[in-house]
Image: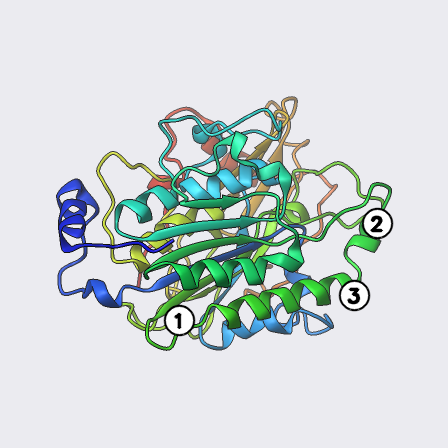
Amino acid sequence: MQRTRSWVALFAAVVAGLGLHCGEDPLLRPNLLLITTEEVRPDDLPCYDPTAENGHGMCDLAEEGGRFVWAFSPSPTPGPAAATLLTGRSPDRHGVSQSVASFLPGPETTLAELLQQGGYATAAFVSNAELNRSRHFHQGFDLYRDRIDLESVVEAAQGWADSVEAPWFIWAHLIRPETAGQTQEALTSAAERLRLDRSVTELIAALSDETRPRGVLLTSLHGRGDSATRPAPQLDLPHLRVPLFWQAPNSSNRPGVTRKIRTPVSLADVAPTLIEAAALSFPETTQMDGAPLPYADLPKRPSRTLLAKRNGETLIIHGAEWALFSPDSHASSERAPSGRLWPASDPSSEKTPARETQPSSRARHKRLTRLLQPGTPGPDQSAPVRP
C-alpha cells in the first residue's frame, strides 16, 4: 500500500509534540528494524561466549554497533516483556501479565503509535500467536501479522517495505515453531539456533537500503533456565538476562556505537532508543521508565535500578548487585538469594552468575530492601547517564 507523506502531515506532527529535532532532514530519517526472539541467552552467541558454535549472524551487528553485556528483560514470559518493549514501561505500569487474557489498556501509548504519528509506515511480523492483536499489541501498526511462520517473515517483510514510502519501522519477532512434548534441549539445539541465526541474517540483508540510513536493534524477550526439562519460567538471572545489539543509523547525531557496553540496560530502553534514532521528541504525556541506550560506558557505571516481578517475587538489580525477594523473605536478611553480576575482582567478566543458595549478606539485603519501599526512585529516575 503506497503512502503519501506530505509536509503538512510532518508539520502537524511537530505541532503535536512529535516533531523533528532541529537540523534533521525528514527525507533522511532512518528506517528502523526491531528484531526479537525468545529463549536466546547471551551464552548462546559466540560474541558473548567464544565456545558457542552458532549465532555469528546476530553477532555481526556488533561489528558496526554496540553489544550490551548486561541487558535484562522485566519478565521471564513473552507477554509482559513484549509490552515493556513496545511501551518503554514496566509491567506494573502497563498491566500486561503472563496470562494470555491480559492486554494493553487503551490509554497506553506504543512505540509504533509514536513513530506512526511522526510519519513512519509501521508493520509487525510476529511468529508467536501468544502476542496476537487481541492483546492490543497491534496498536500503532499499519499492518500486524500475528500468525506468520518463521520461514515466511523475510519475504513478507521485504514485500511490505517495498510497497510503502520510507521511512518505515518493522518489528519482526522470530521464534521456532514448538511441538508439544519437545524438551528444551531439542528446542535449543545447534540446528535450531543455526536456523534462527540464518533467518536474522536474511532479514537484515533483505531490508537493506543504500539510499537511506537504517537502525537495527536485536534482542530476546527473555532467556531460559539451565534445565533441559523446560520447567516453568523462573524469576532468576538465566531467564531474565538477554543479548542485545544496537546498530545505530549512520545519520544519527550521536557518535557511532563500536564497542561492548557494560552498563546494565533493560528492554524498557528499546522504545526510547528508537524514538531518539528517528529524531522525534517525546510528548509530555508519554512517561516511559526506560531511557535511550547509552552510547558508551562512563568511567564509573551508573547505579541504575532494574526490577522484575512474577507471582509475588521481585528480583532487583541495582548497579552490580542483585537480590531475589519472595513474599516471606522481606523480614529476614538470611533468606533472599543475592549476589553480584560481575565479581568486584573481575569487572570485565561476562558470565551469568549462578543463583546463590547461601544466605545473602545483611548489608546487601538492607541496601536492596530500601528499593522496595514506597517512594523510592524507580527505573525512570535512575536511568543511565549519557557520556
Q: Which residue is mark 1?
A: 257
Q: Which residue is mark 2?
A: 228
Crowd tier of the residue under label 2, counting other residues whose Cα lies within 10 Å: few below 14, some 14–19, many 20 or above: some
State the CA–CA distance, disc 3 to disc 2.
16 Å
| Quarter of the picture holding the C terminus | bottom left
- Up-down: is 102 above or below 218? above
Q: Earlier in the sequence, mark 3 or mark 2?
A: 3
Q: Which residue is mark 3?
A: 191
Question: What residue type is disc 2 on?
Answer: Ala
Q: Residue at x 25, y 45 (%)?
A: 282
Side (left or right) of 69 relative to 193: left
In the rendering, which numbered label is found on residue 119? none
| Image x and y of residue 19, in percent | 18, 50
Question: What residue type is disc 1 on?
Answer: Val
| Image x and y of residue 363, in percent | 55, 39
State the CA–CA distance, disc 1 to disc 3.
31 Å
Crowd tier of the residue under label 3, counting other residues whose Cα lies within 10 Å: few below 14, some 14–19, many 20 or above: few
